[in-house]
Amino acid sequence: MIEVRGLWKSFGNVEVLQDINTTFKKGKVNQVIGKSGSGKSVLAKCIVGLTPLTRGEVLYNGESFQAMDKERRKALRQEIGMLFQSSALFDSLTVLENVMFPLRMFATMSVPQMRERADFCLHRVNIMGQDKKYPAELSGGMQKRVGIARAIAMQPQYLFVDEPNSGLDPQTSIVIDNLIREITEEFNTTTLVITHDMNSLMGIADEVYFIHNKHLWWQGTRAELVKSDNRELEEFIFAGSLMRQVRKALRGE
């Protein structure tokens, strides 16, 4: 579980986030949505410690990140898995070497043990027989799968995912979404997903967090989202006429 208390973030005189208070639940897919430039990715970077807060506090299982010393922060980061929008694989490393990279950096394992763990993670994301290939030899969807395998290599308690379906076709997007949900449930991670993909939102989100006008404007479950009368949320989610028809159908209207 991750708690955010009174989080403010400014860059110089420009305020990006104001007084964010919420909890991201363990074993759930927590999806953060909002317009481009609303501060979604900034919020994630603040939570994970890549960007310092202007004010406020982030707690991991009740422990304040801001109060941690350098060694404790380093230990916590080993419990965090991250999947970047571009997958961020190392072009000069093979698929297997990419997945083994965090293990080489942080794990106290022998090389055979690292290889075994990496093989398990690749098998878990349904990639077999590709371990000697380089990222450039893989499709975008396959690269995302390798990115997920690397993100779970250290058996993280927390999983941060930034726009996982960016650049993917709808069918591949569904595969990636299902992987994120399955891994969240299987490893009981606190999963935070930044997304613009409304299909993903309707497909796998357990909890939804809407960032608007620098604030956490609305939060609730996927079922509550469909029934919500929040005007700004409705305009963002159901902007198109087709999506409005979908909403009516979901509501049974």
Image: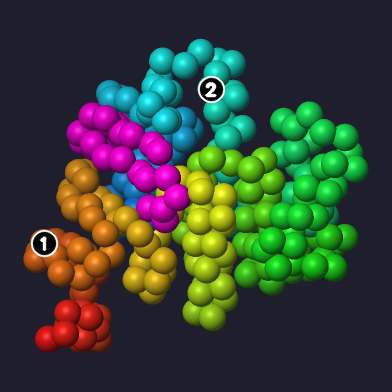
What amino acid is found at the position of numbered circle 2 in the picture?
A: Arg
| Left or right placement of residue 143 versus residue 13 in this view | right
Q: Which residue is mark 1?
A: 230
| Left or right placement of residue 198 versus residue 114 in this view | left
Residue 147: x percent and y percent?
65, 55
Along the line of sight, the residue nearer the viewer: 240 or 179:
179
Dot placed on the residue nearer the N-terminal end, 2 or 1? 2
Residue 26 falls inside the magenta stretch: yes
Q: Residue furthest right?
A: 112
Residue at 62% across / 55% down in the picture? 148
Residue 129: x percent and y percent?
85, 68
Would you say the residues marked 2 and 1 are in contact, meaning their CB atoms lie under 8 Å apart?
Answer: no
Q: Which residue is mark 2?
A: 73
Q: Few, some or many C-alpha atoms within 10 Å of disc 2 (few <14, some 14-19, many ≥20)?
A: some
| Left or right placement of residue 123 versus residue 162 in this view | right
Residue at 75% across / 62% down in the picture? 123
Residue 84: x percent and y percent?
55, 51
- Specify the label residue 187 is tagged with: none
**Quarter in which the C terminus is drawn:** bottom left
Residue 5 falls inside the magenta stretch: yes
Along the line of sight, the residue nearer the viewer: 140 or 234:
234
Q: Over which residues does the magenta segment extend?
A: 1-30
The answer to whether residue 6 is seen in the rendering is yes
In the displayed structure, 170 sits above or below 103; it is below
